[in-house]
Image (cartoon, rainbow, N blue to C red):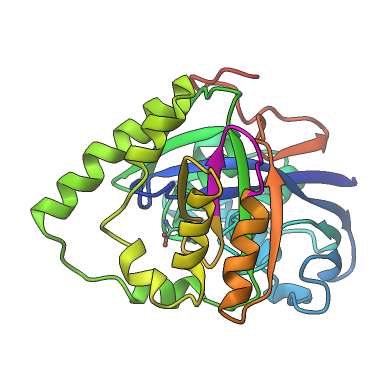
Amino acid sequence: MKIQIKAPATSANLGPGFDALGLALDLWNETNVTPAESFSVQVTGEGAGRLTSGKNNLIVRAAQRLAERASIVKGRHIGLPLQPFHMECVNQIPLSSGMGSSSAAIVTGLLAGNALLGNPFGREEILNLASEMEGHPDNVAPALMGGLVVSMVEEGEVIARRIPIAENVHITIALPDFYLPTKQARAALPRRVSRKDAVHNISRAALVVEALRIGDLDLLGKAMTDKLHQPYRLKLIPGAAQAMNAAKEAGANAVALSGAGPSVVAFSTGEAGVGEAMKRAYEAEGVEARIFRLGVASRGAEIQKPYTDFTEGTESVHK
Ligand code: HSE
């Protein structure tokens, strides 16, 4: 059995929605999985020569995690071996970028493992496993469901809903050539926050969702500010604060760090030189940057053959 899986990039947080909001982007990793004697990985595109091959690869680890979970029946470990496989990955999502490459790998591995084991799990269990592996649901939920997704975790269970969004939103991401591991970007955050900062984010996160839903980019610009993570992370990324300012000066309505960074995401009604402005701002600080102009991915990760619709059963609206 040969399995083909596509998984999209994602931009998490969207400013104030730390660990809760995420948007699937029309930039994809495609993986062909073929049963083999041992685990092996061949990568072309992003991550070629850098991603781990063999059983330590994140896709393989996710498939193994699913097999382990499927092995536990009523608290007993019945042992369900996962058939080793060879993977050919054609990747468009840059690594360590704030664009959801690890979430794409995790959902790809979980979908592959599930298919190889005869689909023991439904989408909700796969989403729970993905969030458990990633540590938070805001990238993996849109990676599985597509579109704008609001998610929360309640006693290990992810509750996620997809919100339809307006079509007049242009997304530009500037990715600096600068390595910031998510672990380091999370370690930079304070353990406690003030009530004032919490209220700042709660109110704005709700309005970011409404602004994207109705396509009100002025409202998005007012709401997309953050007190919980960006102030701490921007200090770690040379040029990021300048790139955010440059995007706004070039006409972007709203800007945020994409995920934990180091990329910056800008929302605008047209392209209007926003990408070039961000690139110049990074370069002025001595950092090269790549620009991505992206649409929203209206579908999440899916198995091409056989086909499974992971957007079913949610309150989703397909564009
Ligand atoms: N919500 C996560 C963070 C996204 O900001 O750390 C990156 O994994």
Q: Is residue 250 left or right of residue 210?
A: right
Q: Quadrant of residue 301?
A: top right
Choose between 150 and 75: the one closer to the eye.
150
The image position of residue 223, as x and y in percent, is 33, 39
Which residue is at the front of the view, 130 or 65?
130
Q: Position of residue 208 (x, y in %)?
A: 37, 35
Give the position of the C terminus as an image quadrant.
top right
The one of 186 and 196 positioned closer to us in this rendering: 196
Which of these two is toward me, 82 or 132?
A: 132
The answer to whether residue 43 is left or right of residue 257 is right
Judge whether 21 appears above or below 278 on screen: above
Residue 268 drawn in magenta: yes
Residue 79, image quadrant: bottom right
**Residue 41 in view (yes/no):** yes
Looking at the rendering, the quadrant in which ligand 1 lies is bottom left
Please say whether residue 73 is visible from this viewpoint.
no
Magenta residue check for 60: no
Q: Residue at x 37, y 44 (%)?
A: 224
Instruction: Work out which residue is located at the far front of the displayed protein and give it.
Output: 249
- Specify the quadrant that holds the N terminus: top right
Residue 217 coordinates in the image, percent (x, y): 46, 31
Residue in the picture at 63% in, 66% down: 280
User: Which residues make up the magenta segment?
Assistant: 265-273
Left or right of 104 on screen, residue 266? left
Residue 146 image position (x, y, % from top left)? 60, 34
Q: Is residue 92 above or below residue 311?
A: below
